[in-house]
Image: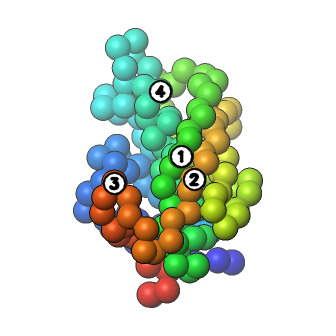
């Protein structure tokens, strides 16, 4: 089995995953999983999970997996497209799981698919994320890209 970087991700002191209370339960180059207990901070005005939470969770897991695949090649990744579909409404107190797996992983782009699932194993949201693989010397928004994970270091 590939190296699991979930503990390293969960130890990060800041970032969107931490702000949303998301726990990564598996993080490899071939699959990323996470869990989330729906709290008040995740809801929109109708009392259901905000679509941005689903989009952010789907993109985050895809980005983690894509980065774990790209970094040993000396690359970083950045999202180009996130297409998320909302299937079922979710309310306060629900426990959600998310799973992301690759569809294709090329030299320049990767496409990952993610599903968000409720306690009854029903899909509540699903999406595809397309990511660009950047070489180590390429800049992003005028700055050098700095990776959070370094698979080449234990």
Dot 3 alpha-carbon crowd within 10 angstroms: few under 14, some 14 to 19, many 20 or more:
few
Callouts 4 and 2 close, C-beta under 8 Å: no
Of marks 3 and 1, the one in the foreground? 3
Give the SS element for disc 3: loop
Give the SS element for disc 4: helix
* Residue at 40% over, 12% down: 46
- The residue that mark 4 highlights is 51
- The residue that mark 1 highlights is 80
* Residue at 45% over, 41% down: 56
Identify the mark at residue 141; answer none if there is no mark: 3
- The residue that mark 2 highlights is 131
Callouts 2 and 3 close, C-beta under 8 Å: no
The image shows residue 63 at horizontal and vertical percentages of: 52, 56
Most distant residue in the top direction:
46
* Residue at 50% over, 35% down: 54
Gap between marks 3 and 1 measured at Cα: 14 Å
Q: Specify which label sits upstream in the sequence, 4 or 1.
A: 4
Q: Specify which label sits upstream in the sequence, 2 or 3.
A: 2
């Amino acid at each position: 089995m590939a190296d699991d970087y979930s503990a390293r991700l969960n130890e990060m002191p800041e970032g969107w995953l931490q702000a949303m209370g998301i726990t990564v339960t598996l993080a490899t180059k071939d699959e990323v999983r996470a869990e989330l207990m729906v709290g008040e901070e995740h809801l929109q005005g109708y009392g259901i999970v905000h679509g941005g939470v689903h989009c952010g969770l789907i993109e985050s897991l895809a980005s983690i997996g894509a980065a774990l695949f790209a970094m040993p090649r000396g690359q970083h990744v950045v999202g180009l497209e996130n297409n998320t579909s909302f299937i079922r409404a979710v309310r306060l107190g629900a426990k959600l799981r998310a799973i992301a797996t690759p569809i294709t992983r090329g030299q320049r782009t990767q496409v990952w698919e993610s599903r968000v699932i409720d306690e009854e194993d029903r899909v509540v949201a699903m999406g595809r994320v397309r990511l660009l693989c950047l070489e180590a010397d390429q800049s992003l928004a005028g700055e050098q890209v700095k990776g959070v994970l370094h698979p080449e270091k234990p």
